[in-house]
Image (spheres, rainbow, N blue to C red):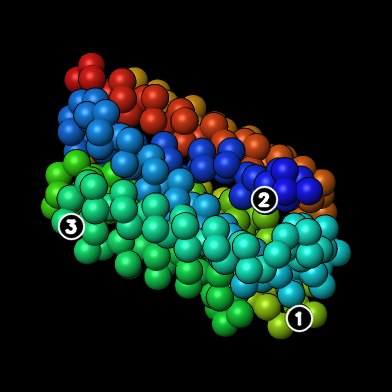
Amino acid sequence: MAWTKIKVFFRMIDLEHSLFALPFAYMGALLAARGVPGGWELLWITTAMIGARTAALCLNRLIDRHIDRANPRTAHWAMASGQLSVFWVWVAVVICLAILLVSAYMLNPLCLKLAPLAVLALWGYSYTKRFTWWCHLLLGMAIGIGPVGGWIAITGSMDWRPLVLWLVVAFWVGGFDTMYACQDVEFDRSRGLYSVPARFGVAAALKISALLHFLVVVLLALSGAIFDLNGVYYAGTAFVAALLLYEHLLVGPGDLEQVNTASFRVNHYVGLILLAVTAAGVLWS
């Protein structure tokens, strides 16, 4: 019985989705170090990101469990269907936040001072669809803390340059989350929930999603100039642009059948590709 619950929990948190944010934290660390960071720093950056991401997802499922239960698309999810105890998921949240704080402490004083702000952002975004259709971009801004955190983990200080990567992640996540939300447009409207598709319609939402992803490509090119990266990085940026274009060709206002593939499966590769070409740009420049 306990093992079954553990398997359900790991399915719920889907560690594979850590691939969305973790590569960008490593990017911030690589650019700050202008080389491969030390193993100690990488260890605590990794634990901090996994702790933060797992806590955020658990909080989202806890906060939205009643909404998810009412939505036919999500009614089978672990919290919505009662497969997991609310108490024990809260315990997991506390443990993961403790991992985040301990990791921040082990990195440097500024990381520890800023960790509560990260917790606030990760906790707060789950409420945003109750009052603003900007919720998708706010989610992206919360996840976009990753590269800034990676930079601070190495330098122990703040700089304006990783904020460009923060915007990259914010627009990237905001774009594919807007696309993903098109599945729930009628449900959101019936429940008075806020989203770009519910506010503007599916066709307009897909255009807004495409605009956000266009800005991602522009900011990635700008990042190459800011961090003085080489042609390998720009080739990787061009490949990411092609992936994002492919993502938008998979869906249309009257055809959302491939929205999960477009929103999640294609985007699994974006962070990994950018990490690889950033490393090449740093190490070979």
Can you identify the residue that label 2 sits on? 9
**In this rendering, would 133 be left or right of 104?**
right
- Residue 172: x, y in percent? 49, 49
Give the spatial CA distance, label 2 vs label 1: 27 Å
- Residue 66: x, y in percent? 74, 75
Quarter location, residue 181: bottom right
Q: In the image, what residue type sits under mark 1? A: Arg
Of the residues under marks 2 and 1, which one precedes in the sequence?
A: 2
Q: In the image, what residue type sits under mark 2? A: Phe
Can you identify the residue that label 1 sits on? 191
**In this rendering, would 98 be left or right of 109?**
right
Give the spatial CA distance, label 1 vs label 3: 41 Å
- Residue 244: x, y in percent? 56, 39
Name the residue: 57% across, 82% down: 131
Can you identify the residue that label 3 sits on? 110
Q: In the image, what residue type sits under mark 3? A: Leu
Quarter location, residue 90: bottom right
Per the image, label 2 sits on a secondary structure element best described as: helix
Name the residue: 61% across, 50% down: 13
- Residue 52: x, y in percent? 44, 54
